[in-house]
Image (cartoon, helix red, strand yellow):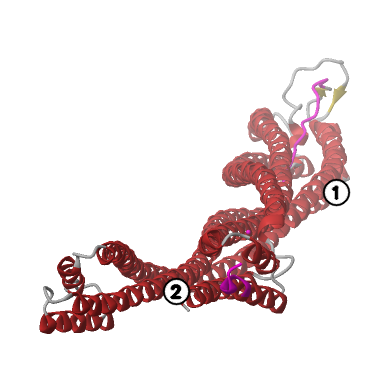
Amino acid sequence: MFLAMAVLLIAMPAATGESVTPVQKVLQMMADMKAKGLKEKDAEIVTFKTFTQFCKDTMAAKEKSVADASDEMDQLAADIERYNADASILGKEINKLDKALDKAQTQKDASTAKFEVEEEDYKSLHAEYEINIADIQVGTAQLKAMMAASSASAASASMIQQMASRSRLPARAKKVLQSLLQTSSSTGLEQSAPEGAAFESQSGGVVELMNGLTEKMEGEKTKLEQQFVKSRGAYQMIQQTLTDQIDQHSTVRNNKAGTKKGKESSSAEAAAERSSTETSKASDQAFLNDLYSECATKSSEYESNQKIRAGEIVALNKAIEIIAGGAVSGASEKHLPQLMQSSAAALVQLRNGGSSTRPSQSVAASFLQAQGKQMGSRLLSNLSLRVAEDPFGKVKKMIQDMVYKLMEEANEEATHKGFCDTELGTNKNTRDQKTTTASELTASIEEMSSQISILSDQISEVSEQVTEIDTSVAKASAIRADEKAKNSETITEAIQASTAVKQALSVLQAYYDGLSLLQKSGTASRNPAQSGASTGVIGMLEVILSDFQRLESSTKASDETNEASHEKFMNDSSQDKAVKQAHIKNKSESRSETDINMKQAQKDLTSTQAELKAAEAYFEKLRPACVESGNSYEDRVAARKLEIESLQEAIKILDENDIA
């Protein structure tokens, strides 16, 4: 296609004054065209190698990006499945804990309701005992006073009748009183003094009966109080146990609920990331497919151009050989008009590129001393000395006071134990909860730290891919700019060359037409060799003109195709870059959110560790008073019970010996 450039200068004005024939000028230009064609063929090879390397590098980067995206999608799919499975298991465990919580709460409420009933029964019965004892004591005192008076038989009988009518007295006491009243009715209260003495003797039996009844009811009341203390202690232990269970279940449930929420959140994040990665992969794949197509097209075009250029060189060689032959060159020197050598520069062309001390006292003292030795009770041993030494009037009261004191101690210890059980249980639950929370926070911090590292690596990798896209775009733009400039120059030169060839043809055709007229008129002789040469030169110029015109149209078509391909490449690159930048933004936001959560977890860990330390310090304070280091609470309760029973037996000994 470059043969026609040879005649570009034929029709230009002379500048050097050297005269040459048109054929010689054609030969000279074809030689220049051959040299230039070889140079441009080599330049096109270099350009294509650059484009080929661009295709190779860009394809490798995109193929790696697609493969990495596929691997990441597979890993994210596995992560999503694992997160969902963990969340499902945690959900089932939470349901079990909810049922356990409901059961424990139901048991706790039932225990409370039962104890409240027992407590009301106890209060009612205890109040009844106190009223009965008080009534009997008052009645006994009044009966004794009436018996002391010689004219009080009728009043005594009335008093006994009132006491016998009390509904709260035990059945045996009522029976004795009723019997006494019947005896008094049959003899008559207004009879002689001996009969009154008999009544008084019977009334004395009532006094003895009522004293014994008082002691019995005191004992029953004491037993009732002891039973209530035990019942309350058992209730408090059950309540503490159930409270601990509820707290423990609640702690575990809340921890699992938090973990489940985290798993669900992680699954959603992984799903979003997988979707983003899938979009990025699709964009990379589309870009890669377009690149495959463009590189294949360029390769095919390069091979075609190389064949054309090779053919052009062959054609130029052949044309030079023909024109340099005697038939053309010799005849031209003889018969064609001489044209002046032009100083105009030769034309060039370009190509493509790519991208918690009465006797009874002695008996009672001996009894207490023996019990003290047997039980190892210092309290009974010490009390035995005082019982032997103190006045009788003080002994019984002292023992009774001691009984009350021991019962108060029992109540206080039970209350203290309840306090200790509650505080120790709560403290243990707090320590366990804070330990578990600290462990979970530590694990969470480690996991988030690892996640931040992974996200940073992914951001760096995608950023590198964006840089590669920018580099590819820059290379492709440079290649396209160079290609466009060369094509523009080629088109301009082809147009100029076509114009020049047309001028040359016009000159030669005018010359030969004139010559032909002369020959017909006989003015000039006909030269067959000259006629053949002129026909060959004109035919060659016409072929050259056709080549220039074809060069112009094919270069325009090629440039339009390359421009469309370049625009598609730029659009694909821009879209791919936008997808990756969105990917970077999402991962950066995720990394920032994870970093914020990690810092909050670190603060929570510091706070939890401080609370754990405070709970451990409180446990050390509770230990001396609440953690048993000698006899157990049950042993102390049993020992105190024996002491109370021994004291009550001592009171009985004093009363029996006193009566005797």
Q: Out of 6 and 459, give the one closest to the viewer.
A: 459
Please tell me whether residue 591 is drawn above or below residue 222 in the rendered image: above
Crowd band around label 2 with a 10 angstrom C-alpha radius: few (<14), some (14–19), many (20+)? some
Q: Position of residue 415 (x, y in %)?
A: 53, 59
For disc 1, the marked residue is 317
* Amino acid, disc 2: Lys
Side (left or right) of 443 relative to 244: right
Circle nearer the N terminus (1, 2): 2
Q: Position of residue 652 (x, y in %)?
A: 50, 75
Q: Circle 1 sits in a helix, a strand or a loop, which is it?
A: helix
**Residue 267 in view here:** no
For residue 138, what is the image quadrant? bottom left
Please tell me whether residue 205 is drawn above or below residue 561 in the rendered image: below
For residue 86, what is the image quadrant? bottom right
- Characterize the magenta stretch by its predominant secondary structure: loop
Does the magenta portion include 344?
yes
Q: Out of 439 and 414, give the one closest to the viewer.
A: 414
Side (left or right) of 583 relative to 439: left
Region in magenta: 342-362
For disc 2, the marked residue is 223
